[in-house]
Image (cartoon, helix red, strand yellow):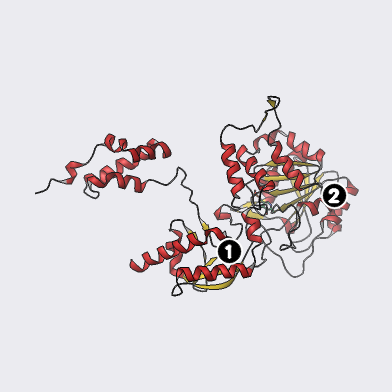
Amino acid sequence: MTEDPRRRTPRTDAVLADPAVAAAAARLGRVRVKTAVAATLEACRSGAVAPEDVVAHVLAVLPASATSLRRVVNATGVVVHTNLGRAPLSPAAVEAVTVAAGATDVELDLATGRRGRRGAAALAALAARVPDAGGVHVVNNGAAALALAACALATGRRIVIARGELVEIGDGFRIPELLESTGASLREVGSTNRVHLADYEAALDDETAFVLKVHPSNFRVEGFTSSVPVDALSALCREHGVPLVVDIGSGLLAPHPRLPDEPDATTVLRDGATLVTASGDKLLGGPQAGLLLGSAELVERLRRHPLARALRVDKLTLAALEATLTGPPPPVAVALAGRPEELLARARRLALAIGPDLATAVESEGRVGGGGAPGLPLPSAAVALPADLAEPLRSGEPPVVGRVADGRLMLDLLAVPAEADDELAEVVRRVATAERAG
Ligand SMILES: *Cc1c(COP(=O)(O)O)cnc(C)c1O
């Protein structure tokens, strides 16, 4: 008769002293590892885990890293996917974040040993990419940029804005409510579908702090529509001596050939806008940030406003932003440059590698997503799989997120870096095999 395995349950100290478990504790924190050990020993006492398997079991239930966020393969065909963290950082930006993570000279001039301008290099990089901006400033996100402008310029006064541009950004947050929360009031002009220069002109008075033009970045109004272009609006504003603030949303700094209707900072400033606001993690392809570009005097006023301190970005953001602006094209730019025939060739290779019984290469249509070029199809290619693989692939390692259409699961390659193809084929094969076995 063998001894009851429950009597052989090892002691907590002994498990924690195992070199692999000790290494995990150094990496993930002792509390987390102790919790896993306690749960495993409980399972051992109840007979669910054999005493000799305790260490292996502890290591298996521990996460790979100290963040519970997982790296995900974005096979949705949406380049800037809000639920997947918007823009993935470029390898250069990732490296910059790692460098800046420790003690760093973000606010110190190493030559003189004195305090230096915070994030000077990132700001210089932004200014260099948009020479039409007299001044630049960076805050936490696009919403923060708007809030700062409203707070500094319009508290107790009025912002003139077209009714068709009262945008809900997402998760229930609305630009008009954001602006009003700063103590500014709104003077809405025009109708849902149409606004004319005369509407703005009639609304301008002594109470006007600025005119705001917001890019309808996540919806389209079609049919009987009209809006006032920036150049016409800026001429009117100049005549009346009020600033024109333009929220372009996506963060394009210059025109993009594939996105002809998407406003960019350079063009909007050339057309006479006083101030442009934008996000850093949409089409710019960088970290979450809010960009303020425009009149040097106005930007300086915003930068010195007390609220600016509450909205300031951390060193990791500054590092990633600088690397995004000066380094190699970030993944968003690479995806936007993707050629349909190359994507289809990749889809064919992937379908072959996965197995023709399971996978077919098909043409598909991706999207910019995340507040940019709404409705614009981006020609792409996908691997079509049985729809019932959607859930197991989302729970795969790494998780793969595709989209289900016409009863099939589409793994769209537009936002998948080509270097990830082998891993993608491997995880699909592994998951599909497990599904058929199970
Ligand atoms: C995305 C967006 C915002 C909000 O920017 P965040 O960076 O998400 O805060 C504001 N305005 C427009 C037009 C947008 O597209």
Q: For the view shown, which residue lies furthest in the left direction?
A: 1
Counting from the top left corner in percent of width and height, residue 10 is at 23, 39
Question: Which is more N-terminal, label 2 or label 1?
Answer: 1
Q: Is residue 112 left or right of residue 384?
A: right
Q: Is residue 13 above or below residue 184?
A: above
Q: Position of residue 185 (x, y in %)?
A: 74, 46
Type of residue at label 2?
Leu
> Which residue matches tag 2?
204
Q: Is residue 34 visible?
A: no
Task: Specify the amino acid type for callout 1.
Answer: Gly
Name the foreground residue: 159 vs 414: 414
* Residue found 52% across the figure and 69% down from its top: 349
Q: Helix or strand or loop: what does disc 1 sit on?
A: loop
Density class for disc 2 (Cα within 10 Å; few <14, some 14-19, many ≥20) is many
Label 2 SS: loop
Quadrant of the drawing holding the C terminus: bottom left
Q: Within the image, what quadrant is residue 74 found in?
A: bottom right
**In this rendering, would 314 be left or right of 57?**
right
Q: Which residue is mark 1?
A: 77
**Looking at the image, do the residues carrying marks 1 and 2 touch, with CB atoms under 8 Å apart?**
no
Above or below residue 108? Residue 402 is below
Q: In the displayed structure, does residue 166 sit left or right of residue 171?
A: right
* Residue 171 rendering spot, x and y as whole percentages: 58, 53
Front residue of 186/313: it is: 313
- Of circles 1 and 2, the one toward us is 1
**Eyeballing the image, is 186 above or below 76?**
above
Residue at 47 percent across and 57 percent down: it is 399
